[in-house]
Image (cartoon, helix red, strand yellow):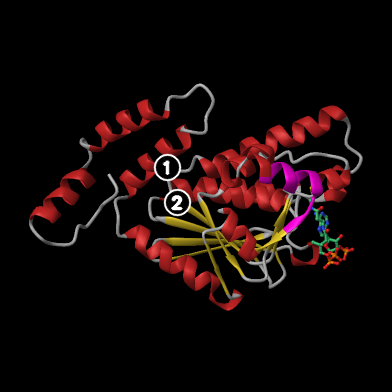
Amino acid sequence: MTYENIIVSAENGITTITIDRQAKLNALNRVTIDELHKAFTSESKSGSTRVIILTGAGEKAFVAGADISEFANFSVDQGAELAAEGQKKLFDLIENLSIPVIAAVNGFALGGGLELAMSCHFRIASDNAKMGLPEVSLGVIPGYGGTQRLPQLVGKGKAMEMIMTAGMVAADEAKSLGLVNHVVPQSELLALANSIAQKIMKNSPVAIGKAIRAINANYKDGVDGFAVEIESFGESFGTDDFKEGTTAFLEKRKAEFKGN
Ligand code: COA
């Protein structure tokens, strides 16, 4: 499939999705959100993709936010719909994918850009990255899950401060806050993402999918995460990957997981 604002490239089980709208610092307009929705949906069904890396094109920005020019004249109802539709189509979709998604934050990740990175399963960043939720400086609040996911990652007090001040944190501070897991020079960012992806791919895709579901359950209202863990743990025993993993261990050989 060809896209206007994203590039999808796949190699040996790793799919890299690059948001490429550099003239607007990769800001998320409607077309880009639709294309990301299509790409993530199609990768999740492909059967061959084991890890997805999400990054921005160019050296300046991961994503500099939702496209302000598209919503500047919205009404109350249109604003609510923008948030609801975006969350469902993209941000919740990514968070709940059973394939691991790594955000490789290569520059500004602001507003919807940081919200997009936070919906990924974890984040790494280049040393020039700057992250923040500046929405209140525009008279609006984060609408793609930022008020929920930022406190989950950095704690309530720091999230309050970041959102109220509309400030940005640099990559090293983001790492010390737990917002990103690793910081490397920009030229090494995708290599690091790929090497983490390689480590992930040594393990059972089915078990990883179940682990994502169980971890996410802790953050869903009205869901007992421990119960989800017990259920998913039990289900693992019925998979071919479990038979292969345990047999390989006992036979002192490397497991070859098929993902079922
Ligand atoms: N929505 C729409 N367009 C955006 C954008 C956004 N979120 N962020 C950047 N752009 C556009 C700019 O309007 C500019 O377009 P133009 O050349 O047609 O005028 C282009 O991208 C380059 O941005 P510019 O502001 O000139 O770059 P800079 O290096 O001076 O500043 C930022 C970089 C990231 C600090 C600045 O672009 C910015 O503050 N962006 C908005 C961040 C934000 O508030 N995001 C949350 C939105 S909810």
Is the residue marked by circle 1 packed among few (<14), some (14-19), or many (20+) residues within 10 Å?
some
Instruction: Please provide the residue range marked out in magenta.
Output: 158-168
The residue under the point 42% across, 29% down is: 225
Q: Is residue 137 left or right of residue 112?
A: right
Dividing the image into four quarters, tell me where ligand 1 lies.
bottom right
**Which residue is nearer to you in this view: 223 or 19?**
223
The residue under the point 21% across, 36% down is: 237
Which residue reaches farthest top? 222
Residue located beneath label 2 in the image:
100
Q: Position of residue 206 (x, y in %)?
A: 32, 44
Which residue reaches farthest left? 251
Q: Main secondary structure of the magenta part?
A: helix
Residue located beneath label 1 in the image:
212
Q: Position of residue 130 (x, y in %)?
A: 70, 62
The residue under the point 35% across, 63% down is: 199
Q: Is residue 66 left or right of residue 219?
A: right
Q: Position of residue 20 (x, y in %)?
A: 68, 64
The residue under the point 73% across, 60% down is: 26
Report the label total: 2
Residue 210, picture quadrant: top left
Q: Are marks 1 and 2 in contact (CB under 8 Å)?
A: yes
Residue 148, picture quadrant: top right
Amino acid at pointer 2: Pro
